[in-house]
Amino acid sequence: MNTVCHNQLIFESLFSKEVVADFAGGRITSDAGGLLLRELDQRYRIAENAARCLHDPRDSHKVKHDLLTLVRQRLFAIAQGYEDNNDAAALAKDPAFKIMAGKAPESDGDLASQPTLSRFENRVTTKDLRRLSSCLLDLYLKTHPGPRKVIVLDMDATDDPTHGKLQLSCFHGYYEEHMYHPLLVFEGRDGFPLAAVLRPGNTHSSHGALAVLKRLIQKLRQAYPGALILFRGDAGFAIPAIYRYLEKQPDLRYVIGFITNNRLLAKTATLLEKAQQRYQETGEKQRLFTSFSYQADSWDQPRRIIAKVEYTRLGANQRFVVTNRAVIPSLSMTTSTCCGAMWKTGSKS
């Protein structure tokens, strides 16, 4: 049976008006929302400043797609959910993406192809990445002017699953997958990204964290002298090198998750019994806190451990954090933006 294609359908008239369905709608897009992102980019010059951080060794006389256009094309594609360069073929003609990249939707040529974008990404150097990271922090300083009383640094390592034989894609035993292992830092109060480092999949959570912290704290101190800085991280950052550095910084407090061990469980055994007894009497979830001095074998000095003991219908749940805060007036177990289960602390100690 042959397929019959119609370019136009005629329907019964309505109010003496002809009703026609026409399939020649021209070039359309389903990503017009990206134009709002373009307005933000125009206001803060994010793509423009990022392009300045990248070197471009190409012969300018042979360049068809300039560096700024390539940055915009990748930036907006990722923001719209097209993280793979293999989407470039479909997006190169999209009128909305052409506008986002600074091109006229009809009169200008198509955007860059997948091979061009892949070459663009692969020629980024370590120096380029450092300049990009500084650009991200500079944007935060620009959008948060004036004195600050408290700055919260949330650091986390997350999994970015990979597929196929990608460069630096490695198997991570904890996540049980092939992945990249990015390191991220956010300002904990408004979620603004301060740093991002792409790392191989088999990298430990704390790898490179100290170097990132030193750079951030130095610049934040210059911009906001006298501000209290609170660092929060999960147990992946519970290493002596980070403790020692943070403890030497004035007006800096840290709260870092700590892996449970038998010595810690022994110190909270009495509190756990109390929580269990209260649960059995009331049938309601119990949550109790305590703190004590503790020194691991790898530490050069004792440090303060805060313990949380819960007892519910599912049984016992014990968590620990290490901190240099002398007093924590109020503790509530919450989920922070980037650090999973982390304790948000109260007023300045």
Image (cartoon, grey):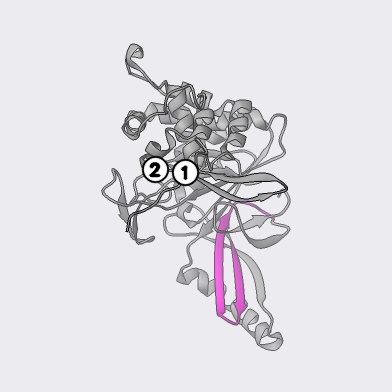
Which quadrant holds residue 343? bottom right
- In front of the other: 330 or 127: 127
Image quarter hosting the N terminus: bottom left
Asked whether the residues under the numbered discs 1 and 2 touch, taking CB atoms below 8 Å apart as contact, a structural biologist would say no
Q: Residue 25: x and y, percent? A: 52, 39
- In front of the other: 291 or 332: 332
Q: Which residues are magenta?
A: 306-327
Q: Is residue 341 left or right of residue 16?
A: left
> Is residue 317 positioned above or below 18 on the image?
below
Q: Given the image, on which type of amino acid does mark 2 rest?
A: Asp
The structure residue drawn at horizontal position 68% and vertical position 62%, both measured from the top left corner, is: 332
Q: Which residue is outermost to the bottom?
A: 281
Q: Is residue 226 left or right of residue 183?
A: right
- Which is closer to the viewer, label 1 or label 2? 1
**Magenta stretch: includes residue 324:** yes
Q: Residues within 10 Å of mark 2 (few under 14, many from 20)?
A: few
> Is residue 337 positioned above or below 187 on the image?
below
Q: Which residue is mark 1?
A: 7
Q: Given the image, on which type of amino acid does mark 1 rest?
A: Asn
Q: Earlier in the sequence, mark 1 or mark 2?
A: 1
Secondary structure, magenta segment, majority class? strand
The structure residue drawn at horizontal position 54% and vertical position 32%, both measured from the top left corner, is: 136
Which quadrant holds residue 271? bottom right
| Secondary structure beneath label 1 | loop
* Alpha carbons under labels 1 and 2: distance apart: 34 Å
Visible in this render: residue 221?
no
- In front of the other: 58 or 135: 58
The structure residue drawn at horizontal position 58% and vertical position 45%, both measured from the top left corner, is: 20
